[in-house]
Image (spheres, rainbow, N blue to C red):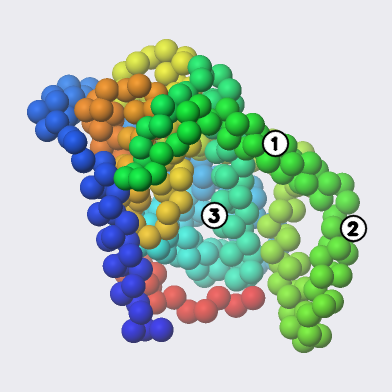
Amino acid sequence: MKRLAWLPTVIGILFATGGLWFFFKGMDPAALLLHLRHSSPWAIIAAALLSIISLYFRGKRWAVMLPAGKGRHTKGLVSITAIGFMVNNILPARIGEAVRMYLLWKKNGFSGAVSVGSVVVERMVDTFFYGLLFGIAVMILPPIRTQGLPLFPGLTVAPDPFRQIAAIILLGCGAAVIAAAWYSFYPAKVRRMLGVVLNILPASFGAKMRRLGREIFSSIDWLFSGKKCLAITGLSLATLICFPLIIFVLAGDFHAIALVKAIFVQGFAVVGAAIPFAPGFVGTLHALVLQAFLLLGTERANAMAITILCHGISYIASTAFGFYFFFKDGMSLKEITTQPTLDS
């Protein structure tokens, strides 16, 4: 396996290069530089602060999600979150997520299963709220007609597909709410159903999976508390609205519909960031955010300038925030890149 340790880096470089090639293809350098030079310093400062605020809210939300238990605590989760995102920015393959799991296990006393489960659940909650916001934004915006606009060479999108996509996403969000409510009211019934599936497995393996399952399921114990559900909803919306607000202030178009458009752009940014190989989402995020702006009719040079600023400011601010805690906590690069196997 060690012989293939270089593979994620190579794949990351390829993804980043491909995305940047698409992003800069057909660029007008003079127009791009003009838009960049006219950027407001106050907007740049606001964007940097919003990037840090989003990490703060994310860490606080994680603390609400985690289950209570003897020998566990939820102190310092903002710093762990910041360090994890800093690692995501400088290393490929979303290694920062594994770093967050490891630090939660090492520093806060949570088991390996809970540490892994909590990060997975957090990402599922993110996906739900990203989808919800995107779906609502598309329904509010006028119909977005692609007119066969090419995404990549040889690949086009049919005209006006987004309302249908949004309807499917919103239906999926509704199904997720129903599933969560069903589990919160009938947890024993859901666990029995899963137990039937696990009984198919060999006895020794099935017993271990049941034990791990109990640990992982504890990561959604917050579903049994109305106050925690409300807190997680509020913190999730506060976390995820920061990126559209960054676009909003950098674009300088202070109208309500502009914020809705920024939420639409965020949907594309999420897909670009979900491609796990490129460090810091370089290239993949640029290509898809640019595409979203073009679909909304934004002039290309202006769209490129906003995309570069949005990514660059967020990247620098979140990386600096992570490094601050990294050095404050006396950590070393070796500590987060040579992690031991988590216990269960």
Residues at marks 3 and 1, CA–CA distance in whole angstroms = 37 Å
The answer to which quarter of the image holds residue 211 is bottom right
Amino acid type assigned to the residue bearing label 2 in the image: Lys
* Location of residue 308 in the rendering, given as x and y in whole percent from the top left corner: 26, 37
| Amino acid type, label 1 | Leu
**What secondary structure is marked by label 3?**
loop
Q: Between disc 3 and disc 2, whose residue precedes?
A: 3
Residue 111, by quadrant, is bottom right
Mark 1 or mark 2, whichever is nearer to me: 1
Specify whether 306 is left or right of 342. left
* Residue that label 3 marks: 75
| Disc 3 versus disc 2: nearer the observer | 2
Q: Are marks 3 and 1 in contact (CB under 8 Å)?
A: no
Say which mark, if any, is on residue 128: none
Q: Nearer the viewer, residue 86 or 326?
A: 86
The residue labelled by disc 1 is: 171
The residue that appears at 47% across and 60% down in the rendered structure is 97
The residue under label 2 is 189
| Label 2 SS | helix
Give the vertical position of 109 relative to 290 (above or below).
below
- Vertical arrangement, residue 237 with respect to residue 84, above or below: above
> Residue 93: where, in percent of width, then height?
40, 63
Residue 148 visible in the current orientation: yes
| Residue that appears at 88% across and 64% down | 192
Residue 306: x %, y % from top left: 28, 30
First in sequence, mark 3 or 1: give its number: 3
